[in-house]
Amino acid sequence: MPAAAQSRTPHRFNLPLAKDLAADAVASGRDRVPIFLFFDRYDCSYCERALAQFVVPISREPAWRDRALYRQVEIDQPLSLVDFDGRATTHELLAARYRVSLTPTVFVVDGTGKGVGDPVVGLLTADFYAAYLENAIDAGGRKLRGDTPS
């Protein structure tokens, strides 16, 4: 794949790109934390806002950074990726498998790639977006730990 195809989005703030979901799955199982997949598009201004104001700050905040593995998926780029089962795929194909067409979309998944909560599609109401993300991460963590909601 040409080096240009492995480039980042033009966004100023980004999560680590999804590269090896099989390795992430091992870490997810070991640490009993979900994998947070942020599906992004190259020219998505809502993605830029979500990343800058909510997603990246949450991923760095001490109370939240260790509660999930945060990865970014570029739905409109053929970036190389190792899927959860160890097979080679691309960001575009992963997005197609999850049927992502609107961005930003967040899926919180387990180590097999199965959703462990409802996806967060769109920026929704900005006043509540951080809460939607935090609820999705919490729900995923509870499922992976076998906790029951209180």
Image (cartoon, grey):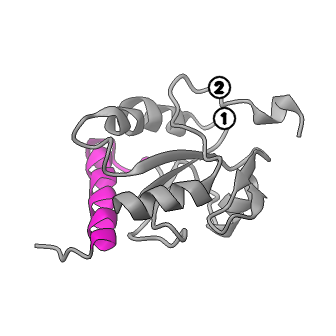
Residue 108, picture quadrant: bottom left
Residue 65 image position (x, y, % from top left): 32, 41
Tell me how far mark 1 sits from mark 2, CA to CA.
Answer: 8 Å
Q: In which quarter of the image is residue 50?
A: top left
Over which residues does the magenta segment extend?
Answer: 123-145
In the image, residue 8 above or below residue 72: above
Seen from the viewer's position, the closer of residues 123 and 79 is 79
Give the numbered dot on residue 10. Answer: 2
Asked whether, in this view, residue 83 is left or right of residue 39, the answer is: right
- Circles 1 and 2: CB distance less than 8 Å? yes
Q: Residues within 10 Å of mark 2 (few under 14, many from 20)?
A: few
Towards the viewer: 127 or 11: 11
Q: Please state the horizontal and vertical placement of residue 80, each as a whole percent of the image.
A: 76, 48
* Residue bearing mark 1: 43
- Give how far across and how far down residue 96 sits, in percent: 70, 64
For the C terminus, the quadrant is: bottom left
Residue for point 50% across, 27% down: 13
Magenta-span inclusion, residue 39: no
Image point 76% across, 45% down: which residue?
A: 79
Q: Can residue 121 be seen in this view?
A: no
**Secondary structure mostly seen in the magenta stretch:** helix
* Residue 117 image-quadrant placement: bottom left
